[in-house]
Image (cartoon, rainbow, N blue to C red):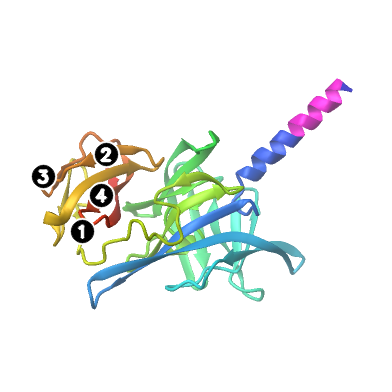
Amino acid sequence: MKSLLLLSLITFCSFNSLKSQSFVNDSNKWYVDYCGFSFETGTSSCETREHRFGNRVIIDSIEYWQVLIDAPNVFFSVPDYYREENGKVFVKETETSQEYLIYDFTAGVGDQIEISYSFTTIQLEVLSVEFIELNSGEIRKMMEVARIGASDFSVFWIEGVGGLRAPMNSERMFDEDVWTELNCYLFNDNLEYSIKDCALTNVDNPVSEEDDLTIYPNPGFDHLYIESNQMDKILFIDIFDLGSNRIIAKQELISPELDINHLTKGVYFLKIIYQDGSNNLLSFLKK
């Protein structure tokens, strides 16, 4: 009897552990920033959308989950239907469209992955694999991927969370004029991972739309240079790592040159805070 109870407990824990690591899971919720850059005005703007899975739908005898979004996307759409099988995530744009692979969380370093959506196919290579800890203490696999032959522009996938760029549609992860970025990820409405403020509407800390802000070189090795038409209005800067840990806190910007030599290789987020309380957030890669 004790053996049976122990086996049942192990099975229950294993099931819940596997479920919590699934991307296609009705307990998951994402806040995603949809951003676009206007070449006409030289400015960018972003809108944050909530995504979660709602109804189960049977299409051609296969079960899919329909994604629910709190409002229509401004810049582009995401697939309607998702399913996951053995660590691979597949989508269908509509009930009658072809099925496409958008994630393979089983891949290891050096493996190649072909993802696609609509009429686009992208050949990827896994550059590195690390493990990160979510707020709950759960450990998740994190993969660095890039186009084959173009490793200078890499992005990160987190098992069960998706990409830090274009989490709901990895085909868009290398877009530059129109792009999406993960704001935060929740499981059972508990915040597990965040990069920004995890708010659908940020009225307390509005983004500065007047600043023509760039950082270069990106990727950077020893130094980054900040170029802004509002340098005199910058109050201080923060730098965060992928785990949302503040590496540099409230540092005054004395010169446009920023020393990043002490940072380890990886992706970081540079937050610029202005005197009026507004802010801008840019990502950079430390090589």
Q: Is residue 218 visible?
A: no
Q: CA distance from mark 3 to mark 2?
A: 14 Å
- At horizontal 11% and vertical 44% (from top left) the residue drawn is 254
Image mark for residue 219:
4
Residue that numbered label 2 is attached to: 249
Q: Position of residue 214 (x, y in %)?
A: 21, 58
Q: Which mark sits nearer the N-terminus, 2 or 4? A: 4
Q: Disc 4 marks which amino acid?
A: Pro
Q: Is residue 106 visible?
A: yes
Q: Position of residue 113 (x, y in %)?
A: 50, 54
Residue that numbered label 1 is attached to: 214
Q: Disc 1 marks which amino acid?
A: Thr
How many other residues sit within 10 Å of disc 2, few (<14), some (14-19) or many (≥20)?
A: few
Which residue extends farthest top? 2
- At horizontal 47% and vertical 49% (from top left) the residue drawn is 157
Image mark for residue 254:
3
Q: Which mark sits nearer the N-terminus, 3 or 4? A: 4
- At horizontal 25% and vertical 69% (from top left) the residue drawn is 43
* Element class at badge 4: loop
How many other residues sit within 10 Å of disc 3, few (<14), some (14-19) or many (≥20)?
A: few
How many other residues sit within 10 Å of disc 1, few (<14), some (14-19) or many (≥20)?
A: few
Q: Which mark sits nearer the N-terminus, 1 or 3? A: 1
Q: How would you classify the magenta stretch by its main secondary structure?
A: helix
Q: CA distance from mark 2 to mark 1?
A: 20 Å
Q: Disc 2 marks which amino acid?
A: Ala
Q: Position of residue 252 (x, y in %)?
A: 16, 43
Q: Disc 3 marks which amino acid?
A: Ile
User: Mark 2, mark 1: which one is toward the viewer?
Assistant: 2
